[in-house]
Amino acid sequence: MDRTLNHSPRIAVIGSGNVATHLAKAVTRAGYKLSIYNHRCESASRLASAVGATAVADLDALDADIYIIAIKDDAIASLAASVAGRKGLWLHTSGSVDMKVFDGVVDSYGVLYPMQTFSKDADVDMTEVPFFIEGCNGDVTRAIRELASSLSHKVIEVSSANRVKLHIAAVFACNFTNYMWAQSADILESIGADFSVMHPLIKATLDKTLTMSPHDGQTGPARRGDVDIIKKHLSMLSGVKHKLYETLSTDIMNEYHHNLTDHQS
């Protein structure tokens, strides 16, 4: 989307974390004039310098047409309350915070939720990231769509209630999956093996998931109903890993093998 917009709105990003960093890069790449505010001035200055934006030290001095709040979910409500009565279009980027957090606080508001895992130092092609949007009225929704479409090829309008479900689905698909990789890495480390030995397996799993349904692609001892192997594995695990293995194996067996008794019996 690298383009310079004529008469484009001035954008302000509030925050300097993972989401804010990638949004700031995308916004400046799209040709918008960008200001950045963070309660830690040095963080705002560092990000602004990296993307060619202007750092603003005082929230009250932040002047833009569109304000994008990209901070921790539990801080959005208090920040929204602190800007009561301000002009401009106010957006947050959360998957699980209702749009109504702005209701009665500002006149124009909505949501710009990029569904992706973000780390500051990991490159992301924002043009391929789906942006889920919501606006307080039709005109606002159109304005948000115009902004989102300048950042990504994939823009979808969705309600706050359904956005939460999307976020939950993303937690299962990404966050919990990554945690499982961390458990795998711990086990490998205990035998002196590097996690890189899992890379071909992970790649094959992801490739398969993109070409067939996850339900049809399930494999492993629990999918086969191999109770003896499951018991053997459980005997070698303890703590969190034992609990995770047992819970997931039970659920998978219940999904595919209704006729099998609980493997713990």
Image (cartoon, grey):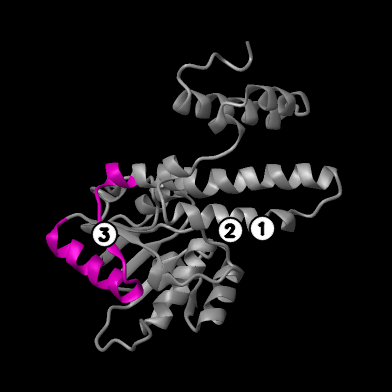
Residue mark closest to the camera, 3 vs 2: 2
Q: Secondary structure at mark 2?
A: helix
Say whether marks 3 and 2 touch (CB < 8 Å). no
Say whether marks 1 and 3 touch (CB < 8 Å). no
Residue drawn 40% across and 52% down? Answer: 94
Using the image as rendered, state which of residue 230 and residue 30 is in the foreground: 230
Q: Residue 179: horizontal and vertical position, in percent?
A: 62, 44
Q: Which residue is mark 2?
A: 203
Q: Which residue is mark 3?
A: 156
Which range is magenta?
137-163
* Amino acid type for the residue under numbered disc 2: Lys
Say few, some or many: other residues with alpha carbon within 10 Å of mark 3 (under 14 / 14 to 19 / 20 or more).
some
Residue drawn 57% across and 30% down? Answer: 222
Magenta residue check for 160: yes
Using the image as rendered, state which of residue 251 and residue 14 is in the foreground: 251
Using the image as rendered, state which of residue 184 and residue 160 is in the foreground: 184
Q: Secondary structure at mark 1?
A: helix
Q: How far apart are labels 3 and 2 at the CA level?
A: 28 Å
Say few, some or many: other residues with alpha carbon within 10 Å of mark 1 (under 14 / 14 to 19 / 20 or more).
few
Q: Is residue 37 visible?
A: no
Q: Secondary structure at mark 3?
A: strand
Residue 47 drawn above or below residue 81: below
Find residue 199 and name its label.
1
Q: Which quadrant of the rendered structure holds the C terminus?
A: top right
